[in-house]
Image (tube, grey):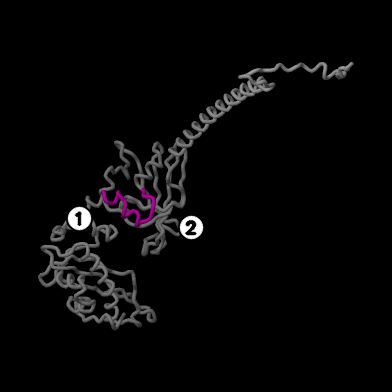
Amino acid sequence: MRQTPRLSIRQRLKPKREKYVERGNTTNSAPHRHSNQSGERKSMNKSYKLIFTSGIGLLVILLFVIDTLGQTTPFVKKDTVIPKFGFALAQFDEYKKWQGNNQFIIEVGMAEGKVTIFGYKNWDSKSLPELHEYIIREIKVSKGKPTDVYILSKDTFRDMETKYGKFAVERQIKLSIAAELRFDEVLSAILFKGTSDEFLKSSYVQSIIGRFVQTIFTGSLAKIPIDAQRRLLVWSRLQSDAFRETKFKDKIYLGVDTTQDVVYNTIQLNQAERASRQVSFALKKLKDIFDITGGIEGIDGLSATGTIGSYNFVRKDDRTDERFEMHVTFDILKRYANAEITNQELVDASLILVDGSRIKVNLTSFS
């Protein structure tokens, strides 16, 4: 007689699994698969809720960042900027002896939705900007008080008058912005962030030069085509006094100032040599201008004018400034531009004067 094996207490208490029949197959695992699928659905629901909640959180953070950026000035300390206003509008404030610079002030407000400078709504039509680069030195924001922005020039300016005498010093401009204004929006209206070369290419410069060409190119110079006038003004780096009408021996010339920021040593260079250096410099300017204008009906040619500075560095006497003139007709310039004549041949065909006396210049001897 076969004996049934005795079961342990654990085995006897363990519940029996019911067989599950599916499509003719017998298996003990179906109840567990159903249970797993149910658990997976619950897990997925939790994941969707987590993703949805996280998405809302990210959206809130993104909206906050966008709003914060909207309230942040695009101008920060040490930015390079170019004032859009003419320096003639600035008023002298004081000499900062400990900083070694002159400080000027610009008061900025708002009228009829337009930024004003000292109450002027049309400040951008009063004078052309100067192409001097500045650095934002400091921005002072005080609740209920004007915001003060200090910009310091990268260049020094010679012979600036101070109560301690004349010095070559940096220029500082204090922009005092009314307390009720958003200073970031105001700075965008009166400052250009970038270099002087970038400023010249900007849409802002192109939008304002048309207001000034008619007051700069007057008389015979008004015969220069408008497009050429605009290009000349940009070429001169917005110097409104760079061009003038010049007359010599019954001929009319478009004159350009070619003065160099150079003082020659009279011990090393005589007058003819100094004139030769000046002519070499002027030739490049005249070619640039001719490339822009070509021949101009009613004008005979181009003139390079200016001063030649010299000084005896041993005797240390007073500086001498000689008046320089060089007149070239358009027919000679055209031949030069077409490479039909050399530099020297153009010089020989030109009228060159120093202090009113005509001189002969040899470029090759003093290069």
Q: Which residue is mark 1?
A: 227
Element under disc 1: helix
Q: Which mark is residue 98?
A: 2
Left or right: where 154 falls relative to 116: right
Amino acid type at mark 1: Asp
**Where are the magenta residues, as a range?**
191-207
Amino acid type at mark 2: Trp
Look at the picture and state if 180 lies above or below 35.
below
Ranked by sequence position, the earlier of labels 1 and 2 is 2
Q: Relative to the observer, which residue lies in front, 238 or 169?
A: 238
Relative image position of residue 137 (x, y in whole percent): 46, 52
Left or right: where 72 falls relative to 224: right
Q: Residues within 10 Å of mark 1 (few under 14, many from 20)?
A: few
Left or right: where 119 falls relative to 352: right
Q: Relative to the observer, which residue lies in front, 22 or 366?
A: 22
Relative image position of residue 233 (x, y in whole percent): 25, 58
Q: Relative to the observer, which residue lies in front, 202 or 84?
A: 202
Name which residue lies at 21% across and 62% down.
292
Q: Residues within 10 Å of mark 2 (few under 14, many from 20)?
A: few
Name which residue lies at 43% across and 38% down.
70
